[in-house]
């Protein structure tokens, strides 16, 4: 699948030659920053039609860069999308790539090439700052949180890392820097358990009066900073993060890293928490939008991007930095905490015109905002090229003119001309995954094979829609809401999609009809 057409190869080679002629080594090896938002939907930014929140910094990058209308993450939940982004492989090929608890082992085999190892091995300094959620340690032995935590980001290509283990709503609620918990007191060791309570610390069930925001049962484990989390932890009192400071903490580390790399090309995977729950932002941003905490988190995300860009400009790095902005999956209003996102959304449509959001196979689950900026090297504009985040690895390899290792990024395609706005030619089709089930988009057609569509509904609701044989077929340009099933009218289209699934994902050809609590992160 990754092999580009001969035309794409010619365009890519020509483009690379022009870049080399234009700027020599600097143009050949630009700095690369992937800014990966969390639970941010297609319609959340102003430049994608969002209302109620001003994303001026992101909009500025979109105006001078390329804004994509048909860009996809690989899955409608976080862990699998992050796996696909880094490996260039669909997550359903790795059965462990589901929503992980905070104490899960590393799910990327250190022997598997990633975009980080590729760039590191080709002279880049590499860093992860922010959310990880791809596991830590080995499955062979219990993880000791109080020693060197490995394998982890370092073993899959990152020279430097400052991250949390999983998500802000999952324990352990600490930062980990280069494999060590930050500010850990050895006399107060950390213990983590997702099966039973450890220690005797208050939980959301036992002490709801201590909470800043009320949570559902799943999120009613150990209380840290007035917020109850999924899972239980004890110890590490001095090491625990403060939610209100998280964005500043990550931004500070990101800026510190780029400041140090003025003489060497760098790759920064910057993965802020915004706007994943719990949405407990700094007081500077509380009430800054009409959308409640969810909108305030979006404003904070935009502000962080603005400060990072300012730093790049001050250092003289901006013109030679390729910036990619996207998100790991579609939006969700209520996801375990009663914070008023549903009541305050007003006219804002987080998924834009698309149906569904996080967890679902509807378009809103995986169709993402995607903005690519690189001054003087991208052709500004709006692109409808069909692209997936699994394509970034192969495209970056083409950009720096270095071959990928055999078997690396096997599901990705070199779409460098499209990403730089030089071509409207994208991939032929894209696979969309949600909770181990898949869908396929090709052209204006979208096919959902038999199985269940699971999505977050209103407050505390899980909605499951059963899809019977032969599946659902929609024409997206005429029916963005995916309401008119055309499968009976176009059997030849259904057969074509079924053939794609049998060829690319034969293990998914029969459709999967159940989703258990483990897949939902319970």
Image (cartoon, rainbow, N blue to C red):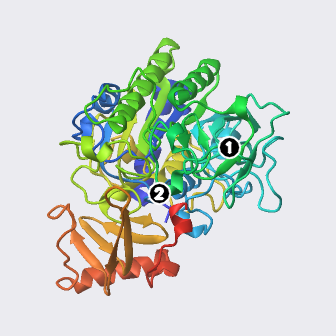
Residue toward you, 25 or 482: 482
Q: Tell me the number on the disc at residue 201.
A: 1
Characterize the local packing of mark 1: few (<14), some (14-19) or many (20 or more) Cα atoms within 10 angstroms.
some
Q: Is residue 462 above or below residue 338?
A: below
- In the rendered image, the quadrant that contains the C terminus is bottom right
Residue toward you, 349 or 71: 349
| Residue occupying image coordinates x 47% and y 78% | 514
Judge left or right: residue 358 versus residue 191: left
**How far across and how far down the image is residue 222, in percent?**
62, 46
Residue toward you, 19 or 461: 461
Judge left or right: residue 121 versus residue 447: right
Badge 2 is on which residue? 77
Please identify the quarter of the rendering in which residue 501 is found.
bottom left
Q: Is residue 12 above or below residue 18?
A: below
Please tell me which of labels 1 and 2 falls first in the chain. 2
**How far across and how far down the image is residue 384, in percent?**
27, 51
Q: Secondary structure at mark 2?
A: loop
Residue 377 visible in the shown view: no
**How far across and how far down the image is residue 308, in percent?**
48, 23
| Residue occupying image coordinates x 52% and y 46% | 398
**How far across and how far down the image is residue 10, in percent?**
43, 51
Please identify the quarter of the rendering in which residue 120 is found.
top right
| Residue occupying image coordinates x 53% and y 37% | 210
Residue 467 visible in the shown view: yes
Judge left or right: residue 455 versus residue 216: left
Residue toward you, 386 or 234: 234
Q: Secondary structure at mark 1?
A: loop
């Amino acid at each position: 699948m990754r092999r580009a057409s001969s035309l794409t190869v010619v365009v890519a080679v020509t483009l690379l030659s022009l870049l080399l002629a234009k700027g020599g080594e600097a143009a050949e090896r630009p700095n690369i920053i992937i800014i990966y938002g969390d639970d941010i939907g297609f319609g959340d930014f102003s430049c994608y039609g969002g209302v109620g929140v001003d994303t001026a910094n992101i909009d500025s990058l979109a105006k001078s860069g390329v804004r994509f209308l048909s860009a996809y993450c690989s899955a409608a939940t976080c862990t699998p999308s992050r796996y696909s982004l880094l490996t260039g492989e669909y997550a359903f090929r790795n059965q462990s790539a589901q929503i992980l608890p905070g104490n899960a082992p590393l799910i990327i085999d250190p022997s598997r090439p990633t975009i980080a190892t590729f760039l590191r091995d080709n002279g880049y300094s590499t860093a992860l700052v922010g959310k990880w959620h791809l596991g830590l340690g080995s499955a062979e032995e219990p993880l000791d949180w109080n020693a060197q935590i490995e394998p982890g980001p370092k073993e899959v290509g990152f020279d430097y890392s400052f991250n949390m283990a999983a998500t802000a709503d999952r324990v352990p609620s600490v930062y980990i820097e280069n494999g060590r918990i930050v500010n850990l007191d050895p006399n107060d060791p950390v213990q983590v358990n997702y099966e039973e309570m450890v220690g005797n610390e208050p939980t959301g069930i036992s002490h709801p009066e201590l909470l800043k925001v009320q949570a559902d049962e799943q999120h009613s484990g150990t209380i840290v900073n007035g917020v109850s989390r999924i899972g239980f932890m004890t110890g590490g009192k001095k090491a625990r993060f403060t939610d209100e400071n998280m964005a500043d903490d990550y931004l500070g580390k990101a800026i510190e890293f780029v400041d140090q790399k003025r003489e060497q090309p760098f790759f920064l995977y910057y993965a802020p928490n915004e706007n994943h729950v719990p949405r407990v932002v700094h007081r500077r941003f509380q009430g800054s939008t009409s959308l409640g905490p969810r909108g305030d988190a979006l404003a904070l995300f935009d502000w962080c991007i603005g400060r990072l860009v300012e730093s790049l400009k001050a250092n003289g790095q901006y013109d030679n930095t390729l910036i990619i902005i996207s998100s790991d999956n579609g939006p969700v209003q209520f996801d375990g905490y009663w914070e008023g996102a549903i009541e305050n959304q007003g006219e804002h449509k987080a998924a834009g015109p698309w149906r569904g959001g996080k967890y679902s196979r509807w378009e809103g689950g995986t169709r993402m905002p995607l903005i690519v900026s690189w001054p003087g090297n991208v052709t500004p504009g709006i692109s409808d090229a069909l692209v997936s985040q699994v394509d970034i690895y192969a495209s970056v390899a083409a950009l720096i003119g270095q071959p990928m290792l055999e078997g690396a990024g096997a599901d990705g395609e070199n779409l460098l001309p499209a990403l730089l706005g030089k071509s409207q030619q994208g991939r032929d089709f894209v696979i969309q995954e949600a909770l181990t089930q898949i869908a396929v988009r090709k052209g204006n057609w979208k096919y959902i094979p038999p199985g269940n569509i699971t999505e977050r509904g209103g407050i505390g609701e899980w909605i499951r829609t059963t899809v019977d044989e032969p599946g659902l077929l929609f024409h997206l340009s005429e029916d963005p809401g995916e309401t008119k099933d055309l499968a009976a009218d176009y059997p030849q289209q259904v057969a074509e999609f079924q053939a794609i699934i049998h060829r690319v994902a034969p293990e998914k050809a029969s459709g999967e009809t159940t989703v258990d609590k483990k897949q939902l992160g319970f």
